[in-house]
Amino acid sequence: MGLRAVVTLSLVSFLMGQEATPEPAIEVSELPQWKAEDLEMLKAGELIPGSTIFGGIALERLLSGDLEPIELDPAVREIPEKKPAKEEWPTNISDEFLSRYFHHAPEVFLVDPQDLLTEQQKQERERFLNYHADDSGFDLYVYLFDTKQEIPVGESLQGVVLDHFADKESTAVVFYFMGDPQRSELAFSEDLSEEIRTVNVRDLMKLSIEEAMQSEEPLTQLEFFLGQLAMRFLGLKKKLKEDGVPGARLRGMGEKEEEKLGSLSSLWHDFRGDSEAFLAVVVSVSFALSVGLLVFLRYLVDRNRAFVFPDAQGSSLLGAPHAPGVGSVISYHNRTQPPSLQRNNYPDYLQRM
């Protein structure tokens, strides 16, 4: 055997004699195991799985085999069921808002110090109230309160009007309760309070409230209420103008224009009251219009009238027609004028030039 073979055999024997290094075992969590005592009780029927959940009473019933219903303890039976708590609405207005509601004149038409509306909703309502004031001549101020809130003792809508709107004209003030339009109140400034009867105020509020109650959503109710009230104010404005109420003015007019409007309205109503003078003026105006119409019709007839001149037949000279040996008109340059007014004799082609 050669040396190489001996070395190879020795190396193989050495490697085969080495033991492989064992890998570390992975720990596995053990499953729950029955205790020996519990297992014996389970096999004997003395242990019922889940009995700890049902309690001792259920375990005794199961072991006894009694099928009668379990009677609850009277103390347990009389425990009242918990009812879901109802949302409670605030009834009092916080002191921090009283000043802005009742002690200071508002700077905008919508008064909402409690932020019952979002900022965007406020801006939309204020734009509507501004447009209404410009269009109808009525300033409508709306005070917003929560659904169940009560006006504090000593404060009232009439008090707010007297304190902050005594020097204003054509002004209406509304106390509106969000979610409960039926509690709303309306009052007018002093210049209109005598002209607008209580019956008219009730009718205005009734129609506006009925319109608002068509919806159950508080914001939509407010929109319907203000829209209907604005429409009624337009009709009220027209009626006040017909009655000649000086307070029914248009926004943006100066004092002189207002006085002039009031005086003209008074003169017109006085004139309407005098039947003889009114009839005489009507007859005179009708006669003048008739004469003017006749004159205009005569002008149209004369303008469209035309004179027709037939060709004159003269004797022939050397086989050709010729005019007499006197001056004659070749043609008239205007067909709508009589011949007596056309003294200049010249051919028609010269007129066309």
Image (cartoon, rainbow, N blue to C red):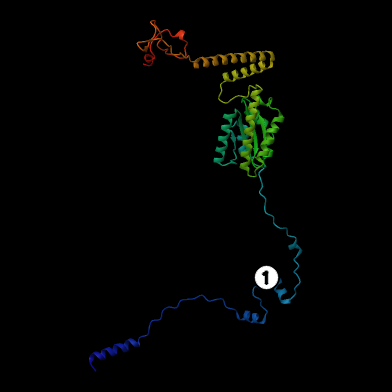
- In the picture as drawn, the residue positioned furthest to the bottom comes out as 1
x, y (%) of residue 105?
60, 30
x, y (%) of residue 219?
61, 42
Quarter holding residue 257: top right
Q: Is residue 161 visible?
A: yes
User: Is 6 located above or below residue 342 in the figure?
Assistant: below
Determine the secondary structure under disc 1: helix
State which quarter of the image contains the C terminus. top left
Reading the image, the residue beneath label 1 is: 54
x, y (%) of residue 182?
69, 39
Quarter holding residue 230: top right
Residue at (62% x, 15% y) in the render: 286
* Mark 1: few/some/many CA within 10 Å (<14, 14-19, 20+): few
77 vs 118, nearest the viewer: 118
115 vs 41, nearest the viewer: 115
User: Is 10 located above or below residue 257 in the figure?
Assistant: below
